[in-house]
Image: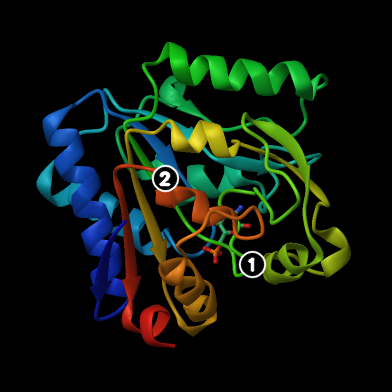
Amino acid sequence: MKVIVEKNYEELSKTAANIIKDEIAKKPNLVLGLATGSTPEGMYRELIRLHKEEGLDFSQVTTFNLDEYVGIDKDHPNSYHYYMKTTLFDHINIDPNNTFIPDGKVENPEKYCKEYDRLIEEKGGIDLQVLGIGENGHIAFNEPDEALNVGTSVVNLTESTIQANSRFFDSIDQVPKTAITMGIGSIMKAKKIILLANGKKKANVIKELLKQDKITTKLPASILLLHPDVTVIVDEEAYNG
Ligand code: GLP
């Protein structure tokens, strides 16, 4: 696992966006795995700038998002559909038909989850996956547990994740208790992975992750130690606490 420590959030965001830019330069029809949450917001701002000022072209890019809350409408301001549309897709030249986000209101989630993984394969697999990390070590919504799902699945969120994400909702009762998330196997199949973390709140989990020499389902991100091409990009606050 390669580690890049940047001075601050702005530098971290630029470094992440430049990695995406370089991958698109190498492969214009890149299949890009995307994350939500506050961590990648700066990276998305920088991608929009690169598109507007330097002509970074997304016309042939396909994206797959990691996760979505269950039971939430696509146009709900806290849905990850709404987040992606307003934070990135509305501001770049991506074809909406090439953007995929799990549907939290689907009738047959089990069948749907299998189809989501099949669709990723059909598009050639994810070339570059962007990840954040939860304070409890989750990646996407793969929460610490006795066992982790291999494929895309419906999962229960832990109290600590519900608590952490309640900052986006009017009250904690409104935070969905379940989500659809790409599984650990779906994520590990990506050819290249970048994991971003910034701020003091992430210092404990980053310290844990970087000292790990064991894989443990109690720290889902530790599975990334088995992946041949992972770059962890952190700012000084997340690195030093
Ligand atoms: C969320 C998402 C993850 C995200 C993580 C960290 O709940 N499901 O994909 O990486 O938690 O979020 P943030 O970047 O807001 O700290």
Tell me where residue 70 appears, x and y as whole percent. 77, 40
Any part of residue 36 in sight: no
Residue at 26% in and 22% down: 60
Viewer-nearest residue: 165 or 182: 182
Residue 42 location, quadrant: bottom left
Label disc, if present, on residue 136 of the rendered structure: 1
Measured Cα–Cα span from mark 2 to mark 1? 19 Å
Q: Amino acid at mark 1?
A: Asn
For residue 226, side relative to residue 18 (left or right): right
Which residue of the protein is positioned furthest toward the top in this rendering? 122
> Neighbour class for label 2 at 10 Å: few (<14), some, many (≥20)?
few
Q: Counting residues from the N terminus, which is met first, the one under dot 2 or under dot 1?
A: 1
Cβ of mark 1 under 8 Å from ligand 1: the answer is no
Instruction: Give ligand 1's quarter of the image.
Output: bottom right
> Neighbour class for label 1 at 10 Å: few (<14), some, many (≥20)?
some
Tell me where residue 236 appears, x and y as whole percent. 32, 82
Question: Where, quadrant-wise, is the C terminus in this rendering?
Answer: bottom left
How is the model colour-coded? rainbow
Please give the residue where the numbered disc 2 appears in the rendered image. Answer: 226
For residue 148, side relative to residue 21 (left or right): right
Residue 98 location, quadrant: top left
Residue at 54% in and 15% down: 118
The label nearer to you, 2 versus 1, is 2
Residue at 37% in and 24% down: 95
Tell me where residue 193 appears, x and y as whole percent. 35, 45
Cβ of mark 2 under 8 Å from ligand 1: the answer is no
Query: Does dot 2 land on a helix, a strand or a loop?
Result: helix
Viewer-nearest residue: 196 or 17: 196
Q: Amino acid at mark 2?
A: Leu
Viewer-nearest residue: 85 or 145: 145
Tell me where residue 24 appears, x and y as whole percent. 19, 35
Question: Where, quadrant-wise, is the N terminus in this rendering?
Answer: bottom left
